[in-house]
Image: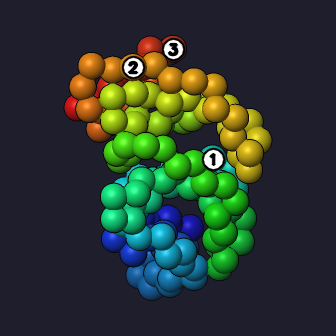
């Protein structure tokens, strides 16, 4: 399956036959700017107007993706990073951190400030690199 986020939300495409891909599922959600897949869950950044939300979407049935959890934050979100069972959300001047061991009920662990607006974060070997 191919998972596409765009101005319409999340689209699921069966591309097992590359010459004849077929849309099999869709989830409206406004502009979606980022997606990461972990097991049967897609973590998606969705934007409606000036409301930015991180969604946890169950894609176990690609024909019927369903939002199972929503994380609303104050500020702009355009990307996310997942390392193991930790989700990093760059939100305005902060990086918010969640434990997603239970993807349907993420636990907020806290945040750390950043001196400028953050557009993305990459975490490797315990080091977070943020870009503006």
Left or right? Give the position of 116 relative to 31. Answer: left
Looking at the rendering, which quadrant does residue 14 occupy? bottom right
Which is more N-terminal, label 3 or label 1? Answer: 1
What label sits on residue 113 in the rendered view?
A: 2
Looking at the rendering, which quadrant does residue 130 occupy? top left
Q: Residues within 10 Å of mark 1 (few under 14, many from 20)?
A: some
Residue visible at 33% across and 29% down in the picture: 93
Residue visible at 40% across and 27% down in the picture: 94
Callout 1: SS? strand
| Quadrant in the picture for the C terminus | top left
Callout 2: SS? strand
What is the spatial separation of the Cα atoms under label 1 and label 2, in whole angstroms? 26 Å
Residue 19 vertical placement versus 98 (above, below): below
Q: Are marks 1 and 3 in contact (CB under 8 Å)?
A: no
Residue 69 placement (x, y as % from top left): 66, 55
Residue linked to disc 3 = 126
What label sits on residue 77 in the rendered view?
A: none
């Amino acid at each position: 399956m191919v998972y596409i986020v765009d101005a319409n939300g999340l689209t699921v495409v069966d591309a097992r036959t590359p010459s004849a891909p077929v849309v099999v599922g869709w989830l409206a959600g406004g502009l979606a700017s980022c997606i990461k897949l972990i097991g049967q869950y897609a973590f998606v950044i969705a934007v409606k107007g000036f409301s930015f939300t991180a969604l946890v979407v169950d894609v176990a049935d690609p024909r019927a993706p369903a939002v199972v959890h929503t994380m609303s934050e104050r500020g702009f979100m355009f990307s996310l990073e997942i390392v193991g069972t930790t989700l990093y959300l760059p939100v305005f001047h902060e990086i918010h951190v969640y434990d997603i061991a239970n993807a349907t009920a993420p636990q907020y662990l806290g945040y750390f400030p950043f001196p400028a607006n953050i557009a993305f974060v990459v975490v490797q070997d315990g080091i977070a690199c943020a870009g503006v």
